[in-house]
Image: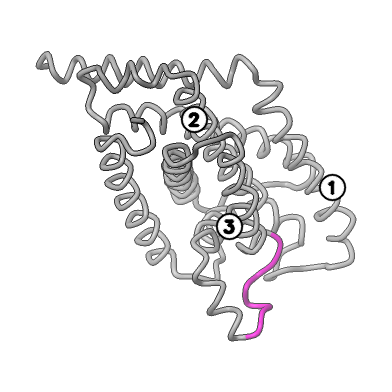
Amino acid sequence: MSSGLRTNAVAFNTIARKEIKRFLRIWGQTILPAAITMTLYLVIFGGLIGSRVGEMGGFSYMDYIIPGVIMMSVITNSYSNVVSSFFGAKWQKHVEELLISPIPGYVILAGYVAGGVTRGLAVGIAVTLVSFFFADLRIANPGITVAVIVLTAVLFSMAGFVNALFAKSFDDVTIIPTFVLTPLTYLGGVFYSIRLLPEFWQHVSLLNPIVYMVDAFRYGFLGASDIDIGKTFAIMIIFIVVLFGFCVRLLNKGTGLRT
């Protein structure tokens, strides 16, 4: 291994380990609350309301919403981990140490994304374990399930990185999750099938990228979907490639970092 590759590997491992240790050190604030919140969703929507709804898409309502609830936890936590951590680095000015170092922008990005993905998957696993108390879970397509959840965590970790770059205050860190991410998630088919909607609103729903991710993850669990799986993977990969290039470009230009 050349010295450049070795340096980049050390830098990546250092940033990734720092990010992972950061959220594990305060797991009572990062993992536990998310697991409790999603448990409440399962109790209220799956247990109380689900008994009245009956079936959804040929499955019990509880079985139907569990994949969506897991995906929702992964999306929100992978996003929030990166946006809060990187903005904190900006606010405390120690991000400047990374900027003057010989570390390429894509390595810095990869380190933060690794932390976001790890937290998203950790919360997703916690919610999955809790879900066993509510339903007899069986994964129809393990490979697709893992691929979808990892790609989703990567995508929203990079989206959080973009938010952190442009954020100028702590209020800016919460605006996008509150007014954009949360509505898109609730309208992303977590609690219902888009086939229940009138045809016009079905087409409108397809403009929401979260619909594809939730649907593909549900296919991994239940083996049934409303959208072609190949199309879903293509959309996720395109978003990831575009976001990766955008993040690296912004980082190399020092957008939101240099005053």
Sequence-wise, which precedes: disc 2 or disc 3? 2
- Helix, strand or loop for disc 3: helix
| The one of 52 and 155 positioned closer to us in this rendering | 155
Residue at image mark 1: 43
Taking the image as shown, residue 245 lies to the left or right of residue 61, namely left
31 falls in the magenta region? no
Sequence-wise, which precedes: disc 3 or disc 1? 1
Taking the image as shown, residue 63 lies to the left or right of residue 161, namely right
| The one of 100 and 115 positioned closer to us in this rendering | 100
Rendered image: mark on residue 218: 3
Looking at numbered disc 3 in the image, what kind of residue is underneath it?
Answer: Arg
- Helix, strand or loop for disc 2: helix
Could you tell me residue 78's position as x and y percent? 53, 38
Q: What is the magenta range?
A: 191-198
Neighbours of disc 2 within 10 Å: few (<14), some (14-19), many (20+): many
Q: In the displayed orientation, state which residue is furthest to the front.
A: 259
Rendered image: mark on residue 87: 2
* Figure colour scheme: one colour
CA–CA distance in space, label 3 to label 1: 19 Å
**Callouts 2 and 3 close, C-beta under 8 Å:** no
Residue at 32% x, 27% y is 108
Residue at 38% x, 64% y is 230
Q: Is the magenta stretch mostly helix, strand or loop?
A: loop
Rendered image: mark on residue 5: none
| The one of 190 and 19 positioned closer to us in this rendering | 19
Neighbours of disc 1 within 10 Å: few (<14), some (14-19), many (20+): some
195 falls in the magenta region? yes
Sequence-wise, which precedes: disc 2 or disc 1? 1
**Callouts 3 and 1 close, C-beta under 8 Å:** no
Could you tell me residue 137's position as x and y percent? 67, 47
